[in-house]
Image: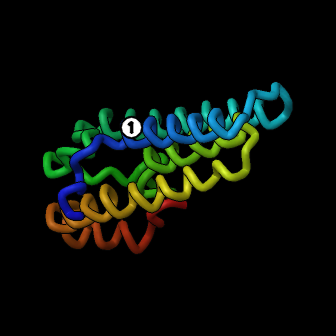
């Protein structure tokens, strides 16, 4: 399934997962309950968006490509800011966003969605990105991999 590598933009994958989670909730007879979980879900969705946006902004500020589809265009290895704590703040933000969706819908079974998203994005986006970054930045990227975890 190497043909899936780098082909679907991760925000679209995240949106697809969120839509499927919402559809599963709806067709299972779920409804929104405006309680603590709803508001905690909204807060996590906002935090996830902020995390992803901050990671994106850091790449743009460092004048390197933020495009995960064209990772070979990367001009610089960014290791500061959020990238000092996680190698993938944008993908981590997407996982946090999806956890927020599951909480907002108050359905524990939907937590399978963020887990499956993380597995999918690791296999078809992160691992191929790491191959390109290792080729492009060599020992600097390898040292970065040893110093900073993939997720958290």
The structure residue drawn at horizontal position 31% and vertical position 55%, both measured from the top left corner, is 125
Q: Position of residue 137 (x, y in %)?
A: 19, 63
Residue labelled with disc 1: 11
Image quadrant containing the N terminus: bottom left
Q: Is 33 or 64 nearer to us in this picture?
A: 33
Q: In which quarter of the image is residue 58?
A: top left
* Residue closest to the eye, 141 or 98: 98
Packing grade of label 1 (10 A; few <14, some 14-19, many >=20) is: some
Residue 52 screen position, x and y as percent: 47, 39
Residue at 57%, 41% in the rendered image: 21
Q: Is residue 85 left or right of residue 139?
A: right
In which image quadrant can residue 67 be found?
top left
Assign a secondary structure to mark 1: helix
Image-based side of 142 in relation to 107, left or right? left
> Which quadrant would residue 66 be assigned to in this image?
top left
Furthest residue to the right?
Answer: 35
Residue closest to the eye, 67 or 38:
38
Point 26% across, 58% down: residue? 129
> Which of the two residues, 103 or 109, is positioned nearer the viewer here?
109
Q: Is residue 92 left or right of residue 125?
A: right
Q: Is residue 152 left or right of residue 74?
A: right
Q: Residue 148's spot in the image, x, y percent?
A: 45, 65
């Amino acid at each position: 399934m190497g043909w899936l590598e780098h082909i679907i933009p991760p925000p679209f994958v995240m949106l697809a997962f969120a839509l499927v989670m919402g559809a599963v909730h709806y067709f299972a007879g779920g409804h929104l309950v405006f309680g603590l979980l709803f508001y905690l879900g909204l807060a996590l969705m906002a935090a996830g968006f902020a995390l992803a946006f901050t990671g994106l902004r850091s790449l743009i500020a460092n004048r390197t490509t933020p495009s995960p589809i064209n990772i070979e265009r990367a001009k610089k290895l960014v290791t500061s800011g959020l990238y000092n704590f996680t190698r993938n703040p944008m993908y981590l933000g997407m996982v946090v966003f999806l956890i927020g969706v599951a909480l907002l819908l108050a359905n524990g079974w939907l937590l399978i969605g963020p887990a499956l998203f993380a597995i999918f994005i690791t296999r078809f986006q992160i691992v191929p990105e790491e191959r390109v970054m290792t080729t492009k930045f060599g020992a600097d990227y390898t040292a970065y991999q040893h110093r900073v975890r993939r997720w958290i």
